Image (cartoon, helix red, strand yellow):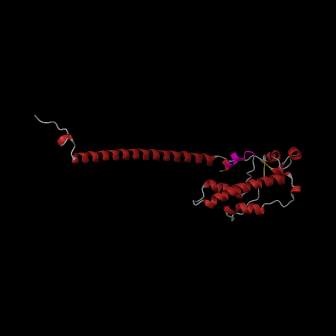
Amino acid sequence: MRTPKTGLGEGGGRTQLQLKYLYTKSILNIYRKIKNMIGVLNLETSNKEKLSAKVMENYMEIKESAQITDNRREITELTEAEQKELESLANQYGRNSFEYHKCLMHFKHIGEEIPEDVPAIEYYDYILKNFRNPKPKEEWTDVDYKADYSRWQRLHVASVLRQQLMKQTIPLIDRQKRIIERVRNGTDFDVFSSQKFLEMLS
């Protein structure tokens, strides 16, 4: 009668050759499983990256097609009723109050343009040095106050822009170019919903 193969050596134990074979086989199986897992992960990552890229592409297309509208009238076009309202707020709260400023936000002041040969990183210093109101503050009108508020908001955007450009090593993207141009051409960032307005401009 033929003795069935048990895979056992003498004494019921496995030979060294058999153990080596089983060990190698086990390692290969583990390697294949890891390789398959990595392949799945790479595929998932690739798909996620493609999806993210597509979402970003669609988002940028929407942003590019969105029209930025600023329907505010210029501060120089104040009606008599609006002038009286501002005068009333100034008398009640003072011209440095939020109530007075909030009313001025509903109008716009287009600032002076920065020359095109001035680097964007120098916009902050240029605005600070060249766009000051020479009149004593006691003589300021509503138009002067609005221009000053707009100037400070413009300085704020120029400051953030400068900090970013000083540490940036990659070329400018379109969004940055648009912000740079709006700071340069005197866009009025002083609006009541300033955060939403800045997001639209970015």
- Residue lying farthest to the top in this orientation: 1
Does 194 lie within the magenta span? Answer: yes
View extreme (bottom): residue: 117
* Front position in the image: 101 or 20: 20
Q: Residue at x 70, y 61 (%)?
A: 123
Residue 76 lies, in percent from the top left, at 83, 51
Residue 7 visible: no
Rendered position, 111 above or below 107: below
User: Which residue appears at 36% of the width and 44% of the height?
Assistant: 33
Residue 88: image quadrant is: top right
Q: Nearer the viewer, residue 144 or 64?
A: 144
- Residue 37 percent location from the top left of the image: 39, 44
Q: Determine the residue positioned at 25% across, 46% down.
A: 19
Helix, strand or loop for the magenta stretch, by majority: helix
- Residue 3 in magenta? no
The answer to whether 22 is drawn above or below residue 172 in the figure is above
Which residue lies at the image location 83% right of the left edge and 50% below the top edge? 96
Give left or right: position of 26 versus 48. left
Residues rendered magenta in the picture: 192-198
Quarter placement of the N terminus: top left
- Count of numbered tags: 0
Q: Position of residue 81 (x, y in %)?
A: 87, 43
